[in-house]
Image (cartoon, helix red, strand yellow):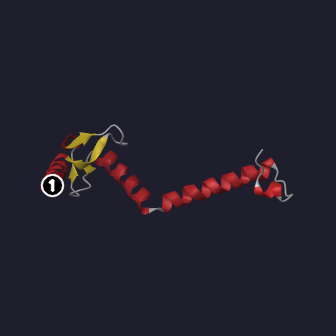
């Protein structure tokens, strides 16, 4: 059976202390996650989408209607990051890059 570092050195921790440590660590992680800029930007984008009904394209930065985005079942809002126009430009540029390298 694996023993914790405290138990190996003769300092047994009570279950209450172990639980408290876990709570402090999870609170610390959650607070740091909220302070990161990407998390805050994502929250602001969700609020903008909920209030206006438009989504911001990550490639061109314009606010567009949801019909101008492809669907993505893995995304939280079920839409792709880039609008259809930008996705076409990206796909074509990647196609020609690969074609040149053949």
* Vertical side of 70 occupied by 26: above or below: below
The N terminus sits in image quarter:
top right
3 sits left or right of 48 in the view? right
Q: Residue pushed farthest right?
A: 10
Q: Residue pushed farthest front?
A: 102
The image shows residue 62 at horizontal and vertical percentages of 21, 56
Crowdedness near tag 1: few (<14), some (14–19) or many (≥20) residues, C-alpha within 10 Å: few
Residue at 25% over, 47% down: 54
64 sits left or right of 43 in the view? left
Given residues 78 and 54, the one toward you in this image is 78
SS type, badge 1: helix
The image shows residue 52 at horizontal and vertical percentages of 28, 48
Q: Label 1: which residue?
A: 93
The image shows residue 71 at horizontal and vertical percentages of 27, 38
60 sits left or right of 45 in the view? left
Residue at 67% over, 52% down: 23
7 sits left or right of 77 in the view? right
The image shows residue 89 at horizontal and vertical percentages of 15, 52
Given residues 35 and 74, the one toward you in this image is 74
Residue at 43% over, 56% down: 39
Count the numbered circles shown. 1
* Vertical side of 79 occupied by 38: above or below: below
């Amino acid at each position: 059976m694996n023993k914790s570092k405290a138990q190996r050195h003769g300092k047994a921790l009570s279950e209450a202390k172990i639980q408290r440590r876990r709570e402090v660590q999870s609170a610390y992680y959650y607070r740091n996650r909220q302070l990161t800029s990407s998390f805050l930007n994502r929250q602001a984008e969700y609020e903008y989408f909920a209030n206006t009904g438009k989504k911001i394209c990550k490639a061109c930065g314009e606010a567009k209607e949801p019909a101008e985005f492809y669907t993505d079942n893995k995304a939280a809002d079920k839409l792709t990051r880039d609008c259809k126009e930008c996705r076409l430009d990206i796909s074509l540029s990647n196609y020609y890059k690969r074609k040149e390298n053949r």
